[in-house]
């Protein structure tokens, strides 16, 4: 049975390499000399939650979706900084071993570097169409250093969570919405094509890592995963406050103090859904994670998530 399992794992690395070759794209394939059309939304309502802000006009809701979409792209660029560093680190295990697995991880790393460049290009294009004053507060290198200070198990669990919700967001919200900026929609179509394979590799490496740690090590790693989720929430609070302030300053009218407070609260709630809660509810993430941890550990994670609702 163990030999079969190992062969299945080998086959999954090989399938990932084949898929990477098949869906390979260049940044110019995505952008095609286009610019953003600010007459259209960037982020769909299912992710932005702008319809909950009933005091905003339709045009203001569209503008808020554009601000959120800009941050959405920037946060992916942020997390891919640490993901790439971790992928390069774990690839060392295959330098003198399984060359198929090594190729899969090298391709993973190369694609993450490309995604970072894509999102830098998207930020530049957004800045050309939107009012000045937007700031993306988190510093990618500082965030990556903090994340990489945690155990590989915790980092891979967070990464699997992110790359699964990336796929879910595209399939359930971005792809079906015909009112999004075509450029923004294409960015996440092409991103999804490669992230689908990354999630497979995340899972394989998380399971491999889990086999090598002790019960005590896993329990500590669960705590570190909870700490990482908390750190993500800290980033979201910072950016939600800044994005709400940017909207208030540039939307073309004066919001009341009550409206500004509700705006910030709702934007934070949307960001928590986008980057934490949607992934935590992903069926495959739940299946993988609960297959590795105890019931008591799962309850600790759930208790941490409940505080974010």
Image (tube, grey):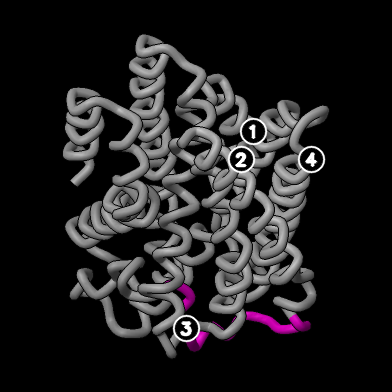
What residue is shown with label 4?
99
Mark 2 Cα shell of 10 Å, populated few (<14), some (14-19), many (≥20): many
The stretch of residues the image draws in magenta is 32-43
Query: How far is mark 4 from mark 3, CA to CA?
Result: 41 Å
Discs 4, 3 touching: Cβ within 8 Å = no
Q: In what element is the residue under mark 2?
A: helix
Give the foreground label among 1 and 3.
Answer: 1
What residue is shown with label 3?
180
What residue is shown with label 2?
83
Query: How far is mark 3 from mark 2, CA to CA?
Result: 28 Å
Query: How far is mark 1 from mark 4, CA to CA?
Result: 18 Å
Q: Residue at x 64, y 62 (%)?
A: 123
| Location of residue 125 in the rendering, given as x and y in whole percent from the top left corner | 68, 71
Q: In what element is the residue under mark 4?
A: helix
What residue is shown with label 1?
86
Q: Earlier in the sequence, mark 1 or mark 3?
A: 1
């Amino acid at each position: 049975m163990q030999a079969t399992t190992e062969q299945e794992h080998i086959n999954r690395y090989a399938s990932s390499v084949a898929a990477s070759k098949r869906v390979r794209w260049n940044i110019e394939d995505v952008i095609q000399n286009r610019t953003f059309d600010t007459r259209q939304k960037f982020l769909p309502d299912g992710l932005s939650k702008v319809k909950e802000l009933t005091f905003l006009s339709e045009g203001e809701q569209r503008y808020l979706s554009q601000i959120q979409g800009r941050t959405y792209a920037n946060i992916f660029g942020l997390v891919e900084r640490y993901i790439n560093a971790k992928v390069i680190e774990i690839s060392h295990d295959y330098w003198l071993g399984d060359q198929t697995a090594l190729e899969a991880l090298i391709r993973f790393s190369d694609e993450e570097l490309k995604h970072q460049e894509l999102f830098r290009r998207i930020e530049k294009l957004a800045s050309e169409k939107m009012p000045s004053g937007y700031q993306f507060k988190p510093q990618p290198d500082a965030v990556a250093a903090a994340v990489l200070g945690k155990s590989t198990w915790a980092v891979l669990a967070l990464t699997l969570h992110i790359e699964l919700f990336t796929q879910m967001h595209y399939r359930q919200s971005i792809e079906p919405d015909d009112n999004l900026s075509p450029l923004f929609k294409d960015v996440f179509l092409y991103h999804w094509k490669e992230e689908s394979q990354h999630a497979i590799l995340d899972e394989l490496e998380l399971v491999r890592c889990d086999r090598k740690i002790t019960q005590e090590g896993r329990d500590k790693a669960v705590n570190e995963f909870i700490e990482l989720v908390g750190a993500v929430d800290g980033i979201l609070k910072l950016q939600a406050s800044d994005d709400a302030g940017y909207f208030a300053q540039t939307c073309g009218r004066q919001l009341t103090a009550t409206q500004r407070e509700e705006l910030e609260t709702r934007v934070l709630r949307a960001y928590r859904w986008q980057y934490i809660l949607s992934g935590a509810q992903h069926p495959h993430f739940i299946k993988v994670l609960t297959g590795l941890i105890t019931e008591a550990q799962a309850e600790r994670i759930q208790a941490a998530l409940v505080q974010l609702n």
